[in-house]
Image (tube, rainbow, N blue to C red):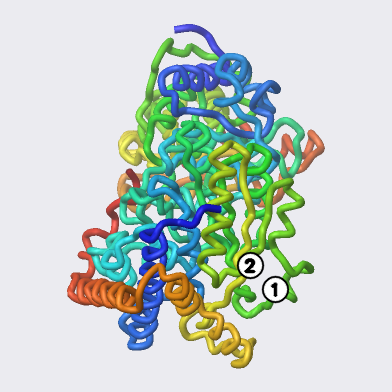
Amino acid sequence: MATKTFLQAINDALRLEMEKDPNVFIIGEDVGKFGGCFGVTQGLYEKFGERRVRDTPITESGIIGLAVGAAAAGLRPVAELMFVDFIGVALDQLFNQAAKMRYMFGGKAKVPMVLRMPQGAGVGAAAQHSQSMESWFVHIPGIKVVIPSTPADAKGLLISAIRDDNPVVFLEHKVLYGAEGEVPDGEYTIPLGKGDIKREGKDVTVVATSLMVKTALDAADVLAKDGISVEVVDPRCLSPLDTDIILKSVGKTQHLVVAHEAVKQGGAGAEIAAVVAEEAIGSLAGPIVRVGAPFCPIPFAQSLEQAYIPGVDAVVAAVKKTLA
Amino acid sequence: MQQPDKKVLLDMYSTMTKIRLFETEVQKFFGEGLIPGFVHLALGEEASATGTCAALKPSDMITSTHRGHGHCIAKGGDPKLMMAEIFGKSTGYCKGKGGSMHIADFNLGILGANGIVGAGGPLAVGAAFSCQYKENGGVCACFFGDGASNQGTMQESLNFASAWKLPVIFVNENNGYGISCPTSKSMAITNISDRSAAYGIPGATVDGNDVMAVYEAVSEAAKHAREGKGPTLIECKTYRWRGHFEGDPCVYRDDKELKEWMAKEPIGRFKKTLLENKVATEAELEGLKKKAEEEIAAAVKFAKESPVPKVDALLEDVYA
């Protein structure tokens, strides 16, 4: 166990898997000598060489397509898109190719690839470099969607994602890159589809993902002062979704708040709310309340961006609303 | 270039004949309502698929298109499993879950037909990357049409493969129309292979209805790729006898054009060459044709008699 940043934990996972499996390689824009736009692949080019840590042209369809083709032909690629916002120019290779190959070819294909993509607002990157796009991916059968909130989870989930025989979308909040936490040494894995209780509580369940887990934990501290005990559940993967951990928690607290930074309308939180409504509405003692960004593009000016990002106050208000 | 041996030549004759017969049967059964969905026939385009795949090794790979039956047969695909798939039967290549546009056989290096125009390019780049990475000497042929040649994905793929010297053979089957739109309206050039210059790679336009011309061009491209010199762009000028899809009324082209192209049909031409050069006798070729007829008839019988998928297969194979 050592204290590491979220970024170092991801780097650690990449290095360990590349040491272990010669079929694992990294491609993406500026992932080589440059070390990645955010520095996630730093040092890997020096360690593994250009054959396995390879800069691509700025060609997102090509990057994802190369990963899909190489995975189908027996390799285990880890591809990086510089920002999740760039998925729009390359989506076909993910949702029509990677996600569907196995099914439409009758179970013959295996597409063991990971697509790492930084997302999230908070750095003044404006409308095309700040979005949280997880709900797009959750709607696609055939891929898995991983969205870690801590350095330890990032490491354990990424190693599992690389070893998984399916296409895995791995979403990293760029504000989390500098977050520190205790990270287990060596080959640490977390099964995909297993959520985690980040804080135990008895009055209300807050299901949160990515950076919003920290916001929810901060809100829990605030609410504790009012005598409200909040349980924070981090599903860690949105597809497959650990519905058991959510339903169990809601069964205990009888109240649900779902919080994410992505736009609230049509967000992944709507799916979680719907699952609870379908499976456990009888056990609820208050309305399900969702916290998410307003229905507008992400603004540049700091004052506007901060108003856009759902914060501690929004989670506190949501908890109070469901308990009212 | 050295003349291929008799077996290669006769195999090409058999393959083209099989494709012709296969597609003719699909046309018939689609017309009778026995085949659901969409089918895109390669009648008239037998030579580009056949000449390309004959120049590859069994371990080499291909990516195919919506008009992919010919590619699949040419790469060694089993007509029984293909026909069953097209009929939507559980015995088909994809257990009836793919249909005409999604036939694949990874054991034969057939990485799949594709319902998205131009999507095979990046996949071929990836497959070729795996050959370069593993240093196994393999190549990947990427079939794509004139319509696909205008997609961004194909430009990205050509650039990617040329920048990394990946062993891709880009085989453009230019049949003159992207659905109804003639190439004269969709591009400002006459020869798609001219685009090779933009990527600094060899390019060639060949008579796509001359199986030997295709075979020779692809053989050269395969040698080039295996030597680590990167991709080649080969344009095969050809023509589809049927519409873009079965049911297409073809209002965008006239009968005269079709008749001219039918006069240039690839199988009869190749047969003539084989006879003139005394590679085979009329009786030998007739024997091969009969064998192909039997194989396709067996495929039809197999497809018709096979069961439809059981409903409980619906959720199988979404994930590995």
Whether residue A281 is visible = no
* Location of residue A73 in the rendering, given as x and y in whole percent from the top left corner: 43, 42
Residue B186 is left or right of residue A213, and the answer is right
- Within the image, what quadrant is residue A233 found in? top left
* Location of residue A143 in the rendering, given as x and y in whole percent from the top left corner: 43, 45
- Tell me the subunit letter for badge 1: B
Helix, strand or loop at label 1? It is helix
The mark total stands at 2
Q: In the rendered structure, which disc, 1 or 2, sits on the residue that comes first in sequence?
A: 2
Image quadrant occupied by the C terminus of chain B: top left
Residue assigned mark 2? B146
- Tell me the subunit letter for badge 2: B
As drawn, the label of residue A106 is none
Report the front residue among B65 and B211.
B211
Q: Residue at x 22, y 70 (%)?
A: B308
Whether residue A42 is visible = yes
Q: CA distance from mark 1 to mark 2?
A: 7 Å
Q: Are marks 1 and 2 on the same chain?
A: yes
What amino acid is found at the position of numbered circle 1 in the picture? Thr
Residue B77 is left or right of residue A236, and the answer is left
* Location of residue B174 in the rendering, given as x and y in whole percent from the top left corner: 61, 69
What amino acid is found at the position of numbered circle 2 in the picture? Asp
Report the front residue among B225 and B78.
B225
Q: Are marks 1 and 2 in contact (CB under 8 Å)?
A: yes
Image: A103 above or below B11? above
Q: Residue at x 48, y 73 (%)?
A: B273
Helix, strand or loop at label 2? It is loop
Q: Residue at x 39, y 82 (%)?
A: B27
Residue assigned mark 1? B183
